[in-house]
């Protein structure tokens, strides 16, 4: 879900246009994680506004990048703010909350930050599950003081309306069954009052402001059947028809799939699902916001917790372990916690950095946010791309991108008089599946052939070239160079081979 406020809001186009990637990358971001402070426990929500990144969750301290757990810790109770460019901790923002934060959103003008969760006090002052802060000063707002009876899991803001979703039954001591709206200026309760029969996990208002989507483990909204997702009128709260909801299978004894996150761009709305039970729907899907019809459905297995649209690509956080139904990696190849999809088709794209997963969810990424260009990821992970980094990480569109893996040495064999066959195995690059391979003969690096080769983290291909016209009886050796357009990696030399006579 997008939790972002831009200083200047322009007209958002409906077209899903691909971006020009950074040199050496195939998607709009590199797979190289950038420095940012860490947390000592899981991050459940992220938002970016005014050059600052807000993180909420169940952590109680933060520490610099590179520091191991228990060292250089700085107290931050469930809410912290970082510089969006450097990743450094913002020491001027240090509210003290008494319980976890699950939702954050900025006001339309970026001047106020709304926070929801399980807390009941902020800086020693009563704030029941909801609070707001001045973005400039970090001060707790004394004007915005709505209350909820239980967890606020989702916040969405547009103009002077703040929509709320969660597990509450009261807002401002008035009946509101898991969905509500208050004003952004004073927190006054609005008449918007659809009723969900179970918790709401996610909310998303479309770019044109005409529809609001809600997701969660509910089965009815306003008494109308709504399996985990519903389209609502953002003003009246009435349920609208939404044919694409059929993408989620009906619950059964062996499978219950729930919408965990929602984001939209132009005339598309994207959903992330997590299923319970082996083989249960864990994927992503897209719908047309105008017609309500399903556009595509990605059936990768491994719960999807977070999605974000950035510059022509849909990024997702999950613990995907089987995408064979989509023509991609099979069960047993391993887990990929970060992936990218083509928003036009849902197919997996060329971006595969990775995290690990830890308690309590054992999922890894749980939250994403963007400023329209960069990506921040939060979750219960402790490692990113194999290096220590707990709770939060970030990716950018600039820089050389991830370097290709080192190729194995070329395999050579004599096939005919004056001819040597050379076999080269393609290599994995975390943000580019198509690389250029150059074959050199001898220590003077004589270029004899160039290939374009394909590889993914789970599969490679063999490239073959027959070098002809060589002097029979001569001693030859070969080396291959691989490049993504920015990074260059060389193999070791092949074994020496005598050219057949």
Image (spheres, rainbow, N blue to C red):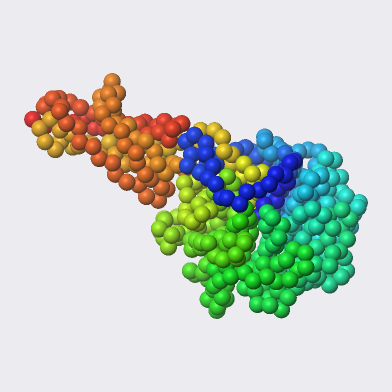
| Rendered view: 89 above or below 382 | above
Q: Nearer the viewer, residue 402 or 68?
A: 402
Q: Nearer the viewer, residue 444 or 164?
A: 164
Image position, residue 430 (x, y; %): 47, 43
Image point (42%, 56%), residue name: 328
| Rendered view: 336 above or below 66 | below
Image point (78%, 68%), residue name: 236
Tell me the quarter of the image containing the N terminus.
bottom right
| Rendered view: 409 above or below 313 | above
Occupied quadrant, residue 155: bottom right
Residue projecting furthest to the left: 501
Q: Is 429 placed left or right of 492 in the picture?
A: right
Q: Is 21 placed left or right of 423 in the picture?
A: right
Image point (56%, 60%), residue name: 286
Image position, residue 314 (x, y; %): 56, 51
Image position, residue 437 (x, y; %): 34, 35
Occupied quadrant, residue 84: top right
Q: Nearer the viewer, residue 102 or 497?
A: 102
Image position, residue 129 (x, y; %): 81, 60
Tell me the quarter of the image containing the C terminus.
top left
Question: How many tags in the picture?
Answer: 0
For the question of whether residue 24 can be seen, the reply is yes
């Amino acid at each position: 879900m997008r939790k972002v406020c831009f200083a200047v809001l322009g007209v958002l186009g409906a077209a899903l246009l691909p971006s020009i990637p950074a040199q050496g990358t195939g998607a709009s971001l590199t797979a190289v994680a950038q420095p940012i402070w860490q947390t000592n426990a899981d991050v459940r929500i992220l938002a970016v506004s005014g050059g600052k990144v807000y993180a909420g969750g169940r952590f109680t301290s933060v520490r610099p990048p590179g520091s191991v757990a228990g060292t250089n810790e700085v107290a931050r109770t469930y809410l912290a703010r970082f510089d969006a460019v450097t990743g450094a901790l913002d020491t001027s923002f240090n509210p003290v909350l008494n319980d976890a934060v699950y939702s954050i959103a900025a006001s339309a003008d970026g001047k106020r930050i709304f926070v929801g969760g399980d807390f009941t006090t902020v800086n020693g002052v009563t704030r029941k599950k909801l609070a707001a802060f001045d973005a400039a000063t970090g001060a707790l707002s004394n004007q915005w003081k709505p209350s909820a009876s239980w967890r606020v899991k989702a916040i969405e803001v547009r103009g002077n309306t703040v929509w709320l979703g969660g597990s509450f039954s009261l807002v401002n001591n008035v009946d509101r069954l898991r969905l509500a709206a208050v004003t952004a200026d004073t927190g006054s309760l609005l008449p918007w009052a659809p009723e969900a029969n179970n918790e709401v996990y996610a909310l998303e208002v479309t770019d044109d402001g005409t529809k609001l989507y809600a997701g969660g483990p509910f089965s009815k909204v306003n008494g109308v059947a709504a399996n985990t997702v519903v389209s609502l009128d953002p003003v009246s709260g009435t349920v609208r028809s939404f044919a694409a909801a059929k993408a989620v299978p009906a619950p059964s004894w062996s499978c219950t799939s729930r919408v965990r996150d929602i984001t939209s761009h132009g005339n598309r709305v994207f959903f992330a699902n997590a299923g319970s039970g082996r083989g249960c729907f864990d994927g992503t899907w897209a719908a047309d916001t105008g017609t309500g019809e399903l556009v595509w459905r990605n059936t990768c297995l491994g719960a999807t917790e977070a999605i974000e649209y950035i510059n022509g690509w849909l990024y997702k956080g999950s613990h995907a372990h089987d995408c064979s139904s989509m023509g991609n990696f099979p069960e047993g190849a391993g887990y990929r916690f970060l992936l990218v999809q083509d928003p036009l088709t849902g197919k997996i794209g060329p971006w595969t950095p990775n995290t690990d997963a830890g308690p309590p969810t054992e999922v890894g990424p749980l939250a994403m946010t963007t400023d329209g260009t960069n990506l921040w990821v939060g979750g219960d992970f402790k490692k990113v791309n194999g290096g220590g980094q707990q709770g939060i990480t970030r990716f950018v569109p600039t820089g050389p991108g991830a370097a290709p893996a080192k190729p194995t040495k070329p395999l050579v064999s004599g096939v005919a008089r004056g001819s040597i066959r050379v076999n080269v195995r393609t290599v994995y690059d975390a943000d580019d599946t198509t690389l250029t391979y150059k074959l050199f003969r001898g220590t003077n690096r004589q270029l004899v052939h160039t290939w374009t080769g394909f590889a993914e983290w789970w599969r490679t291909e063999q490239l073959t070239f027959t070098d002809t016209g060589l002097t029979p009886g001569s001693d030859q050796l070969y080396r291959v160079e691989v490049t993504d357009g920015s990074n260059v990696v060389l193999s070791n030399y092949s074994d020496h081979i005598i050219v057949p006579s």
